[in-house]
Amino acid sequence: MAFADLGGLETLSCGFAEGVATIALNRPDKLNAVCRQMHADFRTALDALETDASVRCLVLRGEGRAFCSGQDLTEDLSTEADGKPDLGEALDRDYNPLVERLTALRIPVIAAVNGVAAGAGANLALVCDIVLAGESALFVEAFCRISLIPDAGGTWVLPRLVGRQRALAMMMTGEPVDAKTAKDWGMVWAVYPDADLVAETQAFAARLASGPTAAFTRMKQAVESAWDNTLPQQLAVERDLQAECGKLDDFIEGVTAFGEKRAAKFRGK
Ligand code: T3D
């Protein structure tokens, strides 16, 4: 099914315009807490997204006054044979595949954060490629308040974004980090007035959706592999991916447009 034909799911509202797919978390009365049904709806949305070449950028945002309050703490927990909670099961079944699928997407993935992004909700935003925020945005690594460690990729992404000390302080205190600080620390690319966030995000996403998508895919691959590579290894990665970029239609178009002193019209391949 094409992403544009998805319509609304039970807990997500999905839209498509200008090459941009939007998935909005839609449980505003619970500040968009993530429940099992939301994970099922994410699977449906991502199934459609991954196979739809017309989608060239994804926006993740929250309906109502918050982005996402993390795991729905009122949901029944899976238990082990001894009756104790088995939190690892929910990660294996739901959160880890979701984070892996979001981060493996070939297109730019943007989080638009309004209001609170707490717990797994904060980390779902932070694993996106680019985070845009409304002035009301607050990032809260709330896990310590219930004696848990950050999950949904938080321990991986946060130190990479803000460094070890700030990451651990956020995790151990659970103190909210506001939009301005998040931008100063490199967690957020841009901050907009709340009333403008949706429109600014759509404009930003549409700009990326009309960009050289196949080159963006390779940028993501290169940046991803850089974490573990030595410089010589990474230079080799750049050589291989650049060689692929040189064979793209969009490279010819970019160079032609430069010569003709006009804006390039990229088709994403
Ligand atoms: O359980 C597992 O599987 C472990 C997995 C862990 C992953 C995680 O994400 S752990 C972290 C979970 N999230 C939190 O601990 C945050 C909980 N929420 C809050 O601390 C506060 O709600 C906020 C700081 C996010 C916002 O505060 P405030 O004062 O702006 O709003 P509120 O009044 O607390 O919340 C509004 C409603 O949303 C309220 O419902 P009500 O009373 O109007 O019917 C509240 O209960 C509900 N809500 C907020 N967060 C959650 C939630 N309901 C379920 N789960 C939530 N996480």
Image (cartoon, rainbow, N blue to C red):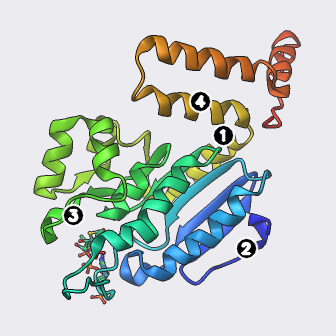
Vertical relation: 166 (above or below) 155: above
On the image, the x and y values in percent for residue 11 come to 53, 80
Q: Specify few, some or many for label 2: CA neighbours under 10 Å numbering under 14, 14-19, or 20 or more.
A: some
**Ligand 1 in which quarter:** bottom left
Note whether 19 is above or below 31 in the view shown: above
Q: Depth check: 82 or 168 in front?
A: 82
**Foreground mark, 3 or 4?**
4
Within 8 Å: ligand 1 and the Cβ of disc 4? no
Residue 136 appears in the figure:
no
Residue lying at the far front of the rendered structure: 81
**What residue is disc 1 on?**
208
Q: Which residue is mark 3?
A: 142
Numbered circle sitting on residue 6: 2
- Label 1 vs label 3: CA separation? 32 Å
Mark 1 vs mark 2: which is more N-terminal? 2
Amino acid found under the numbered disc labelled 3: Ala
Q: Quadrant of the C terminus?
A: top right
Q: Amino acid at mark 4?
A: Met
Select label 1 or label 2 by which is in front: 2
Label 3 Cα crowd, 10 Å radius (few <14 / some 14-19 / many 20+): many
Q: Is mark 3 within 8 Å of ligand 1?
A: yes
- Residue of label 4: 219
Tell me if residue 69 comes above or below residue 190 in the rendering.
below
- Measure the C-alpha gap from mark 3 to mark 4: 32 Å
